[in-house]
Amino acid sequence: MSEDVYRELAQRLDAIPNGFPATESGAELRLLAKIFTPEEAELAAAMRLTHEPAADIADRVGTDRETAYRTLKGMARKGLILAKKGEGELIFGLMPFVVGIYEEQLPRLDEELATLFEEFFQETQGGGSMIRNAPAGHRVIPVEQAIPFDAEIFTYERASELLEGAKAWGVRDCICRVQQRLVGKGCDHPVEVCLVFAPVEDVFDHSEVTRAITKEEALRILGETEEAGLVHSAANYRDGHFYICNCCTCCCGFLRTVAEFGVPTAIARSDFWAVVDSDECVGCGDCVERCQFGALSVPEEVCVVDYSHCVGCGQCITVCPTDALRLERRPEAEVSAPPMDRRDWMALRAQERGISMLDIL
């Protein structure tokens, strides 16, 4: 099999602001070859982020329009591309590898795919351009009970508010945790913890991947993940959210990059950080065990916070027996508002990477 078609697709995916870096070993090509057939890869490599008719894509490739339409429909069902209703027929759009194509492979994730992804992850040290360029792809959402009651909170900083604003809710397995278990790693944290939501009722009722749940169930799962010590995160923009990840530094691609490769900017910190009341601290060390980022220590019987490692998740606050820890707003110089929405995020990421969006939109 020629690698050319997969190399073209990889280059197309890297032309998206999210990125999809090349490797010396060709790990990214083997990964794509596992997910896409050559025919699917050829069509995807000619696609744009903007939805368009199959005929336009087929003409660029030089293939039969009807055949292309059938193939593109099948690709949408497999979570390889996006599809929506156009004028009389479906129209199709390219989506990034992360967050996008990879996450939609959950029903097809097996040991081979998990191993191929791990090879790519390790060789790119967390995903290269996907994870190291600003703005970060994900943003930490603090545990709500750790936020001071009198603090001004934006909607995107409160996970429950994101859920309250939806009309449909669902939960699916954490692909990060499933992938790590398939390669013999990972942890014992619960798997069915990834929350998704939508502004339209009943959209998850017939999904093969997502289990439709009520708002009350979604809020319950959110609380259970907090009790388990999992870190909330979502897309790094203010409006247009549709999922909340609840993960850990041993499984999550974003958080693993912080823990394994020492890239603190792999995920945007919340606008809070932990503060210690030294008079109340008894030096028990419960918070040190709870923190997944190595931000806390008890060198002389009082907890000390390393602010270069604190992401503001608030998990340490939930286990402090003397209420000696609290979250406070970071200083203004340490805070930057996230992009307004996905389009704004893409424009800023494209600028950061020095790529043009003219050919991909």
Image (cartoon, rainbow, N blue to C red):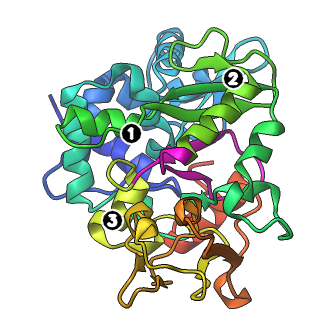
* Left or right side of 247 for 211: right
Q: Does residue 31 appear in this view?
A: no
Mark closer to the observer (2, 1): 1
Q: Which residues are magenta?
A: 227-248
Foreground residue among 343 and 210? 210
Which quadrant of the structure image shows residue 350? Answer: bottom right
Q: Amino acid at mark 3?
A: Ala
Circle 3 SS class: helix
Does 100 sit above or below residue 359? above
Q: CA distance from mark 2 to mark 1?
A: 35 Å
Within 10 Å of the Cα at label 1, are there few (<14), some (14-19), or many (20+) other Cα atoms?
some
Tell me the number on the disc at residue 250.
Answer: none
Question: In terms of depth relative to the viewer, which is nearer, 16 or 129?
Answer: 129
Residue 144 lies, in percent from the top left, at 70, 56
Q: Earlier in the sequence, mark 3 or mark 2?
A: 2
Q: Which residue is mark 1?
A: 189
Q: Residues within 10 Å of mark 2 (few under 14, many from 20)?
A: few
Circle 1: element type: loop
The dot on residue 84 is 2
Q: Amino acid at mark 2?
A: Lys
Residue in the foreground of this view, choosing between 144 and 303: 303
Horizontal and vertical percent for residue 333?
68, 90
Q: Residue at x 59, y 21 (%)?
A: 55
Q: Is there a contact, CB below 8 Å, between mark 2 and mark 1? A: no
Left or right: 281 as drawn, with respect to 167: left
Q: Is residue 133 visible?
A: yes
242 in relation to 248, above or below = above
The amino acid at mark 1 is His
Where's residue 241, x and y in %? 71, 45
| Residue occupying the point 71% across, 60% down | 344
The residue pinned by badge 3 equals 259
